[in-house]
Amino acid sequence: MAVKKGKNRFMEVFDVLFIMVLCFATLLSTMLMRGKVLVGSGSGGGMAYTFSAWTFLLTFLGLGAYLAIVIPQSNRELGEIVEMIYGGEKAELPAAAPLEQPVPAVNPE
């Protein structure tokens, strides 16, 4: 089975760029919502974080969508790897002998 180099390289680049864009979007959206920078601006002296249900929901949905795409793709690629390594003709195993052999009767005298 031939390995497709172009598709794998494209998927690697896509995965890396997608994660980088998600990180950038998360950090940028946090800074824009608060209107400050992480180092601290003005007399506030730092960034105060607050919990927003809407932002949490969007992040959770984004993560769920990402996993819904990546997990089936990973399972498919894992199946291809397993098939490539173990997929040849399988040797027929010999019939197994019984685990317990009958014990011959002993005549006590």
Image (cartoon, rainbow, N blue to C red):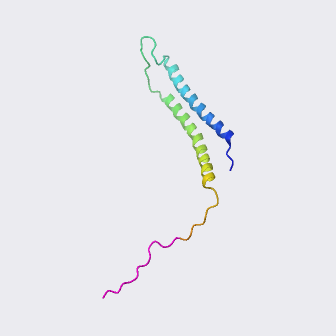
Q: Position of residue 61 (x, y in %)?
A: 54, 35
**Residue 108 located within the stretch drawn in magenta:** yes
Foreground residue among 7 and 58? 7
Foreground residue among 94 and 38? 94
Reply above or below: 75 against 108: above
In which quadrant of the rendered view does residue 88 lie? bottom right
Residue at the bottom extreme? Answer: 109
Residue at the top extreme? Answer: 42
Foreground residue among 97 and 75? 97
**Residue 75 located within the stretch drawn in magenta:** no
In which quadrant of the rendered view does residue 17 lie? top right
Q: Residue at x 48, y 19 (%)?
A: 34
87 on left or right of 57:
right
Judged by its main secondary structure, the magenta piece is: loop
Q: Position of residue 35 (x, y in %)?
A: 50, 17
Reply above or below: 77 against 105: above
Reply above or below: 43 against 74: above
Which quadrant of the rendered structure holds the C terminus?
bottom left
Q: Position of residue 94 (x, y in %)?
A: 56, 69
* Label total for image: 0
Q: Residue at x 55, y 71 (%)?
A: 95
Q: Residue at x 59, y 45 (%)?
A: 72
Q: Residue at x 63, y 37 (%)?
A: 11
Q: Which residues are magenta?
A: 96-109
Q: Position of residue 31 (x, y in %)?
A: 50, 20
Foreground residue among 83 and 22? 83
In which quadrant of the rendered view does residue 67 lie? top right
